[in-house]
Amino acid sequence: MERQEIEIFLALADELHFGRTAERVGISQSRVSQTIARIERRIGAKLFERTSRQVALTPIGEQLRDGIGPAQRRIEEEIAKATAAGRGITGILRIGFSGAFTGHLLHHVSEEFGRRHPGTDVRIRQIQISDPYGPLRAGELDFQVSELPVEEPDLTAGPVFVSQPRVLLMASSHPFARRPALAMEDLAEATLLTVAGAAPAHWLEYHFPRQTPSGRPIPQGQAITHWEDALSLVLAGKGVTPVAAAGEHYYSRPGLVFRPLTDAPHLDYAFVWPLDRETERLRAFVGAAVECVRGLGGPARALRALWETGGTPRAGS
């Protein structure tokens, strides 16, 4: 069997669906069918039972899968290891994130990246909302995943990793908690928490505006330096704050309520790195992350797909 034939056979043995196999391998569905038929003729036995409703491995198909699967994975690992060494991908990769949900997805990607590039050591840490680019500029991180927009002359933004609707987080005792949804104009009737520290002015205005769309002032509350401060202040009734909708899965606790902000732009989290420090290792990880997110349904679907396939939200991860 040729390498691509092995890849197609193992993909179909895993997916048990010709359409998903074609998408995974990057070929047409008819090509998958033709390849499997060719392998079966060569072996002289059926490898799959096909009906209008399902695809299943035959006993001989199971035997072949169990026999060549581990060997194929070992070959891929060795090729990836040699390729990584040749391209300079091995070594430590330090990644920052804002938002527990982006950290959760990054850990998921890093597991796959580690299998592809065994010589890498991926280290993931949270960055604080009060200093979103400080560790990156100081060389403590190679790159990070954080909220757009990025309008810094020394930084560049790469692909969007996560895209989420925006919701408003408040105490269950807040008057807004009785409403099913809110609009940005409603913020004039609330106290909005602010952020202390070195966050850029354009970034603050996008995420923590001082005016509603019609120009009404939004009352400004206490400034926070860590995201955990926001949770405790909201619980104490000191203000409200926008957050990504995924926050309800990661920050939910008694006394907190999340309500949709129906006219607020989505929160997009993208890869960000210094213009002068782009490396092959960085490009390899970002490429693997984009591929992983695409496989989970795209930036808007990836988190939900991760939960549905067994990923468990981990606070602070």
Image (cartoon, rainbow, N blue to C red):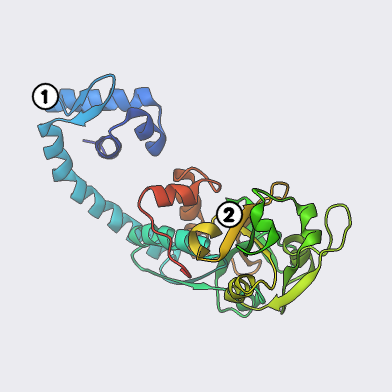
Cβ–Cβ under 8 Å for marks 1 and 2 = no
Q: Which mark is residue 44?
A: 1
Query: Mark 1: which amino acid?
Result: Gly
Q: Which x, y percent locates residue 277?
A: 60, 69
* Residue 135 position (above or below residue 186): below
Secondary structure beneath dot 1 equals loop
Looking at the image, tell me whether mark 1 or mark 2 is earlier in sequence order. Answer: 1
Left or right of 107, for residue 283: right
Tally the marks: 2
Q: Which mark is residue 70?
A: none
What residue appears at the point 11 percent right and 25 percent down from the top-left corner? 45
Structural crowding at the residue carrying mark 1, measured as other residues with C-alpha within 10 Å and reported as few (<14), some (14–19) or many (≥20): few
Mark 2: few/some/many CA within 10 Å (<14, 14-19, 20+) = many
Along the line of sight, which residue is nearer the eye, 134 or 165? 165
- Please tell me which residue lies in front, 163 or 295: 163
Of the two numbered discs 1 and 2 in the rendering, the one whose residue sits closer to the viewer: 2
According to the picture, the residue beneath numbered tag 2 turns out to be 245
Can residue 19 be seen? Answer: yes
Q: Where is residue 99 drawn, in percent x and y?
A: 55, 65
Q: Position of residue 228 (x, y in %)?
A: 57, 75
Q: Amino acid at mark 2?
A: Ala
Q: In this view of the protein, can residue 267 be seen by the observer?
A: no
What residue sits 42% from the left and 51% below the top?
306
Q: Quadrant of the N terminus?
A: top left
As measured in the structure, the alpha-carbon distance from the residue carrying label 1 to the one carrying label 2 is: 54 Å
Q: Give the structural element (helix, strand or loop) at label 2.
A: loop
In the visual, does 293 lie left or right of 34? right
